[in-house]
Amino acid sequence: MVLAQWREIRWSLWLGLTFLALVLIGLVQGGFWLKAFATSADQLPIEEVALIGERRFTADQEVRDALHTLERWSLFTADVGQIRDVLAALPWVDRVTVRREWPNRLRVFLVEQQPVAHWDGEQWLNDRAEPFMAPPRDGLASLPLLSGPDGSAAKVWNMWQQLSELLALNGHAGHALSLSGRHAWQLVLENGIALELGRKDTLARVQRFIDVWPELQRDGRVPERVDLRYDTGLAVRWQLNEQEKQKG
């Protein structure tokens, strides 16, 4: 009686172990199959990249060239971080978000840099007053020309905004603003007149120029440079008229 019960228990144990082993083998094989399926670009190729976001300066071909390696990836194995880094390295791109979408698409949300000024000749300032390098694009020639020492971009942009508001209220417009290594300001107006403003009382000195501008225009001559680095008064260098140019 006891021997029969023991044999029955042993067979049940073996059957249970065999079933468990089969289940484990099936899970392992299923895992290998799923991995092979997921990593095969032929099984789940990326057939579409949806570009979201307004683009003015980044051409479709630039994006295609940056994503030329996508054909080697499946939807599961696509390195989202690498895709983001490759696109973010494009010169006019500010930031990128990448998301997978079943069954065969990547959604890419691309935000471009918003240039507000030229910076130090070859660079640009974005709307956060951060310098960045990018090739020229049409429609940006009217942006102001700003320059200054390393690390001064935010300071120069802030001063430009203040001066632009003051000038606009009085019928003038600026063209360029520079901060020297000695922290002295020079403002060039849209009409080409250069204002030397020194290192202090910048807004007050521009206001002084605005106040005397009607007087400067009275004799018909055009200032070339106005030095306002005095506690009171100013010095003017005039543009040469035609007769003076001929004599020179």
Image (cartoon, rainbow, N blue to C red):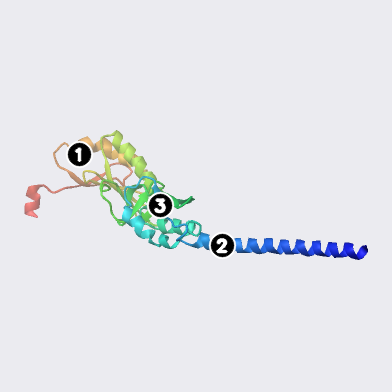
Q: Which mark is residue 49?
A: 3
The spot of residue 85 in percent (x, y) is 44, 58
Q: Amino acid at mark 2?
A: Trp
Numbered disc 3: secondary structure: strand
Q: Position of residue 238 (x, y in %)?
A: 17, 47
Q: Quadrant of the C terminus?
A: bottom left
Q: Earlier in the sequence, mark 1 or mark 2?
A: 2
Residue wearing tag 1: 216
| Res 96 visible | no
Q: Which badge, 3 or 2, comes first in the chain's sequence?
A: 2
Residue with the mark numbered 2:
33
Label 3 vs label 2: CA separation? 27 Å
Residue 130: image x %, image y %? 40, 51
Q: Nearer the viewer, mark 3 or mark 2?
A: 2
Which secondary structure lies at badge 2? helix
Q: Are marks 1 and 2 in contact (CB under 8 Å)?
A: no
Judge left or right: residue 88 versus residue 23. left
First in residue order: circle 1 vs circle 3: 3
- Identify the amino acid type marked 3: Val
Circle 1 or circle 2, nearest the eye: 2
In the foreground, 142 or 90:
90
Residue 218 appears in view: yes
Q: Nearer the viewer, residue 31 or 204?
A: 31
Q: Residues within 10 Å of mark 3 (few under 14, many from 20)?
A: some
Circle 1 packing at 10 Å, graded few (<14), some (14-19), many (20+), is some
